[in-house]
Image: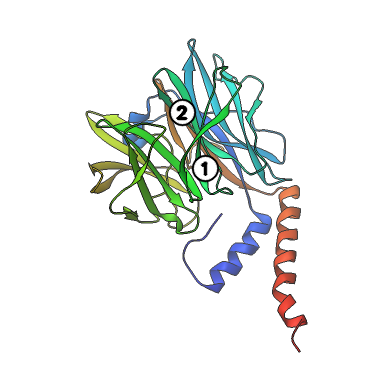
Amino acid sequence: MYLVKGGWKNETARRFHALFSHPLWNIGIVEKPIQAFLEPERIGEVHWLPPLPRGRYLADPFGVLRGGKTHVLCEELDYRTNKGIIVTFQLSDGFVPSTREPVIVEPTHLSYPYLIEDGGRLFCVPENFSTTEISLYTTDEFPRGWRRVAVLIQGVRAHDSQVFHHDGRWWLCYTDVDKGPFDKLFLWHSEHLTGPWRPHARNPVKTDAKSARGAGTPFLHRGQLYRPAQDCSRTYGRRIMINRVLTLTPSEFEEETAAVVGPLRRGPYRDGIHTLSGVGNMTLVDGYRVTFDKSEFGRALDSERRRFLGALTPLWHRS
């Protein structure tokens, strides 16, 4: 959890809270298309996957239909290493997942495997904010065999990229770890998915912690473009704002909030939501509940210990 506002009191409270309260994420399936979330009070039941063994969770789901079956790519995080990898599984009737299989693994933390279809091929843009580039992956052996084929944008540590085609042009938006991970939206455009990509004339096109950072797949409804975004104004991963895009050109951008989704109070993961991903006539979501995990407690405690000792080092070296 991350408190966006406040001074040292909020920061102290956040660190204490993080020692004992750990978000346990999971993935859910809603039997309605993503457009139904424009009326969130009517979305109905969420079918949650069985939780993973203690110390692990799934989040950031994206899906694709192949051979009449729904395949999901998502993040799997291990609390012991605090490192995510991209895994895949197939949903059978009754939303029972097949055995998970790692498909994209890098030395750094991966999450948010955003899927794109173009020219009959499937592509993926996973989040990898430890590097300074936004990379494009593809495969000829789906669901396995993913490989990196292009670097879309260099010199940026991006969160939660959204890539979509609209009005004859490709668009890519993200928030920047170094310039505003929660509130500053950056937009790029290109004639081709593989580039070259050009920055929007008004970057950052938006500054708003309530509705900037990406939260899944943009979609069309009655000819209007909508973009899901995270509301990070109070905490990270609390709820989703669906924005109606009013203007989108290489020189102008404007959007307004059309609907607010979550937290999903009727299920076991009722403390927050940060992904909304359409796949056919279904929608994939994620949600979390606050819990206590011994392995995460140990990792967080060790992190605080190292931070405290690091703060004392200048005092020890005073003459």
The reply, left or right, for residue 161 in relation to residue 171 is: right
Q: Are marks 1 and 2 in contact (CB under 8 Å)?
A: no
Amino acid bearing label 1:
Arg
Residue at the disc numbered 1: 270
Measured as percent of width and height from the top left, residue 287 is found at 53, 39
Secondary structure found at label 1? loop
Q: Which mark is residue 53?
A: none
Measured as percent of width and height from the top left, residue 239 is found at 44, 46
Above or below, 55 relative to 156:
above
User: Considering the image in quadrants, where does the C terminus appear?
Assistant: bottom right
The reply, left or right, for residue 190 in relation to residue 81 is: left
Measured as percent of width and height from the top left, residue 144 is found at 61, 21
Q: Badge 2: how crowded within 10 Å, few (<14), some, or many (20+)?
A: some
Above or below, 295 relative to 266:
below
Residue 211 visible (yes or no): no
Residue 30 visible (yes or no): yes
- Nearest the viewer among 127 and 286 is 127
Above or below, 61 relative to 13:
above
Secondary structure found at label 2? loop
Measured as percent of width and height from the top left, residue 202 is found at 28, 54
The residue drawn where x is 51% and y is 60% is: 3
Mark-to-mark CA distance, 1 and 2: 13 Å
The residue drawn where x is 33% and y is 54% is: 203
Residue at the disc numbered 2: 45
